[in-house]
Amino acid sequence: MNWFTKTFSSTVGRKIVMAVTGLFLCSFLVVHLIGNLQLFRNDGGEAFNLYSDFMAHNGVIRFMEIILVLGFVFHIYDALVLTRLNKAARPIGYVNSHPEENSSWSSRNMGLLGTVILVFLIIHLWNFFVPARFEANGGLERVMIEDVEYHNLYSAVVLAFQNPIYVAIYVISMIALAYHLIHGFQSAFQTLGLDHKKYTPFIQKFGVAFSILVCLGFAIIPLYFFFLV
Ligand code: HEM
């Protein structure tokens, strides 16, 4: 085993991979949310459909999609391996352990929260990404914008969020995502060694604000289409 494989298959190496991929996935969330804000323009979905078309055909974005998939795969794989190693190291919990007194609920339930997000992601990709890219799951309607034909992803979003079950799934998943990010954000900085008397309280507050704002931004979209459109 060379030093590279050795480093990244050690516990510390896996934690570093989780931290870096987690922060990368956070940056994806920001870009995705900003793109989705086009849905609020009162233009019948024109800006959103043009934006989606650009994202689907731009070479740099397509390359970043591969990195994104790898980010998800490594993040989930290392989470599973670390959970298994933790369990193997301590098959029976400490007799006098009171985890609820010295750790947060989200830090003790990252696996459960991550699983909710993974299930959400599968439903989400099946809803929008699969019809847009592979013409599967019913495909998408077409719309003409200045004599050019585009996929009408906007109408797919409007239709999905007329369904109260989807709205509930999205809102509950965004609550799970918020808790996952609140712990994950500060944990990533700690893993990367950025633990400083002066900066750590700021990083923690920033992490909480970031997690709540991003997840609120996503959760508002299904609620807006269900109640107001
Ligand atoms: C209500 C909120 C959301 C809406 C309306 C939304 C909408 C969409 C749409 C329309 C697509 C297809 C884009 C295309 O193929 O051109 C997409 C793709 C995707 N979404 Fe979302 N999304 C939301 C929340 C999220 C969240 C919270 C996550 C992650 C936890 C996420 C992860 C993804 C991923 C990984 C893709 C595929 C990659 C991509 O096309 O960029 N989405 N989303």
Image (tube, grey):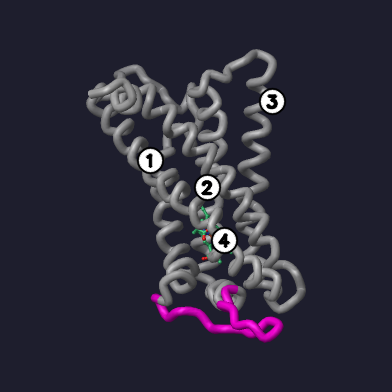
Query: Which one is in front in this view, the residue at disc 1 or the one at disc 4?
Result: 4
Amino acid type of disc 1?
Phe
The quadrant of the picture occupied by the N terminus is top left
Upstream in the sequence, badge 4 or badge 2? 4
Q: Which residues are magenta?
A: 136-153
Tag shown at residue 177: 2
Location of residue 74 with respect to 220 vertically, above or below: above
Mark whose residue sits in front, 4 or 3: 4
Task: Please name whichever residue, 204 or 39, is drawn nearer the observer in this view of the structure.
Answer: 39
Nearer the observer: mark 2 or 1; the answer is 1
On the question of residue 116 being in view, the answer is no
Q: N-terminal of the two: label 1 or label 4?
A: 4
Q: Give amino acid for label 2.
A: Leu
Does the segment drawn in magenta span residue 9? no
Residue farthest toward the right in the current orientation of the protein:
42
Residue at mark 3: 202
Q: Earlier in the sequence, mark 4 or mark 3?
A: 4
Three-letter code, disc 3: Phe
* Separation (CA) of disc 2 from disc 3: 21 Å
* First of labels 2, 1 by sequence position: 1
Residue 86: x and y, percent? Answer: 30, 27
Q: Which residue is mark 4?
A: 58
**How many angstroms separate mark 4 from mark 3 (CA)?**
36 Å
Residue 147 inside the magenta-drawn segment: yes
Asked if labels 3 and 1 touch by Cβ distance under 8 angstroms, the answer is: no
**Label disc, if present, on residue 74 of the rendered structure:** 1
* Mark 2 nearby-residue class (10 Å; few <14, some 14–19, many ≥20): many
Q: Secondary structure at mark 2?
A: helix
Q: Please state which amino acid type lies under the numbered disc 4.
A: Asn
> For the residue labelled by badge 4, is the local secondary structure a helix, a strand or a loop?
loop
